[in-house]
Image (cartoon, helix red, strand yellow):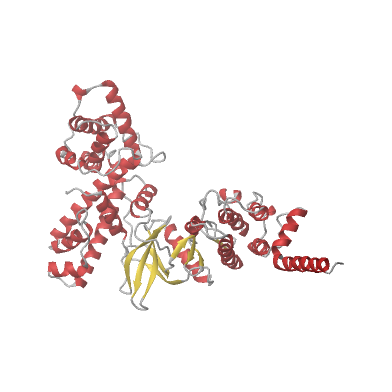
Amino acid sequence: MSFPATRLSVVERTRSDDEEIRRVAWATIIEAYWKPVYKYLRLKWSLGPDEAADLTQEFFTTILEKDLVERYDPARARFRTYLRLCLDGFASNARKAERRQKRGGDVTLVPLDFQTAEGEMARHEGSVDADVDELFYREWVRALFERAVADLKQHAGQAGRPIMFEVFARYDLADEGESRPTYAVMARNLGLTAATVTNHLAAMRRQFRQIVLDRLRDLTSSEDEFEAEAARLLGSRSSHSSRDKP
Amino acid sequence: MSWISDRTIDRLRDAAAWPELDGRYAITGVAGRGGMGTVFVARDHVLDRDVAVKVLDIADRKGSRVARLTREAHILARLDHPGIVPVHDAGVLPDGRSFYVMKLVRGRRLDEVLAARPPQAVRLDLFARVLEAVAFAHAHGVVHRDLKPENIMAGDFGEVFVMDWGVAQDGAADSEPAVVGTPGFMPPEQEGAGVVDRRADVFALGAVLKQVMGSDPSPALAAIAVKAQHPEPEARYQSVEQLAADIARFRNQEPVSAYRESLRERALRLYRRYELPILLLLAYVVMRFVLLVAAGV
């Protein structure tokens, strides 16, 4: 496996002299974080939908205006944790100042579909009492995976192999409560051989992993932070599939 | 983009971590997760058996994680002992992650076994088997450095396996600069991230023994654990064999080196050890006395 050449993370690219590079970097950050921010404000800060939407926009506007990313020190915290702490401070100040009339911002880099985000709130499974960092992390992972799945679907379509994504979707994106179909059943339903289903699934998983890691590398500010985030995301969790331990 | 549930997130995390092995091994599930890798259950189609495959979570740019897993596989391959899980195969996945294939151990972790409160004789028998495996590793220059009940597996037929050799120290030199081990099981000298010797494992085994012996141990057994866990390495058992010898003496109702018993304790121990002969002798004496009385002597 070849590692990508060292490149600037989005955090570093927000400090670029090139306006277009800065714009894309900000769009990447907002795209990755707006939903976690909105849901965090709804759950942790118990804000109403309109208030949370306004404050979400204002938060990113403030970050842009006050160069909060410029002040980020990778040696002190992960970027995600830094943003969450900024958000807590921002929400606390906003609550104290009751600046409701000033709410809202002009973040137009990425369309923020608050209606969809609010619809997702009804399906929220996490406990509000959960650790706040864990709550923010879970929403961040959800946003990351949603984007990665969309990218995967687009790549498969562009390659003229939407059937490959269909196999992945039926097996790894099966709806809540649905049991996974067997390879044989999927093969029959999709008009493929079981071996083809296996190969398609393996290829899609490999590509999904690469997309996730690429996005993760983009959203972290150093190799150490990337590796720590990747290990947490794709590694150590409590075992749930078997009591056997080899 | 459609909304992804928490359950689907877990599925996707598994999907992204799923190793792409060659046709010989077919992954069938997840067995457990550790500090640097995930252990999968797989079917070995060549030998038609289930195996365990430990796969690195991510391939790091520096290669230290890859080197660590590879080193663990090499250590396990060298330690051919019934109490240490055998390695069958090793390699690197297309995405750069290293892996190795080993025997699938079916059983429970020692902490789970102890939670069921088996008799002391059973607990000490399991502990003695752990000591044998660790002593064997020490004889081959390997210090485990992370011994704890969670890293010990007990099978359904009394077999015991010492697991997770990922932070083991192989020889005097150590390429692992970070602090390794688990608080509570790690001796003071290990907290400094320096090179340790086999007495570090003796300390950890003392901590394991504390859990093995339960909440109300005999003073002699408690003294063995205290000696094994002495903060100064020089004051501990100098080898696992010495610790094992004291455990064996305790199990045989003999005096242990770690504890000076009182006269009463000694008498009680001797009584327990020779209970049957003592009772027979007493019965004989009583019978003789009764016969003598009956004879009017």
The vertical placement of B265 against B285, above or below, is: above
Q: Nearer the viewer, residue A45 or A18?
A: A45
Q: Is residue A159 visible?
A: yes
> To which quarter of the image does residue B55 belong?
bottom left
Q: How many marks?
A: 0
The x and y percentages for residue A55 are: 22, 30
The vertical placement of A82 against B116, above or below, is: above
Q: Quadrant of the N terminus of chain A?
A: bottom left
- From the viewer's perspective, tell me whether residue B3 is left or right of residue B24: left
- From the viewer's perspective, tell me whether residue B130 is left or right of residue B23: right
Q: Is residue B260 visible?
A: no
Q: Quadrant of the C terminus of chain A?
A: bottom left
- From the viewer's perspective, tell me whether residue B112 is left or right of residue A157: right
The vertical placement of A16 against A198, above or below, is: above
> To which quarter of the image does residue B255 belong?
bottom right
Q: Nearer the viewer, residue B218 or A17?
A: B218
The x and y percentages for residue A28 are: 23, 43
- From the viewer's perspective, tell me whether residue A79 is left or right of residue A186: right
The x and y percentages for residue B269 are: 71, 59
Q: Nearer the viewer, residue A102 or B231?
A: B231
Q: Nearer the viewer, residue A130 or A36?
A: A130
The x and y percentages for residue A73 are: 38, 37
The vertical placement of A106 against A97, above or below, is: below
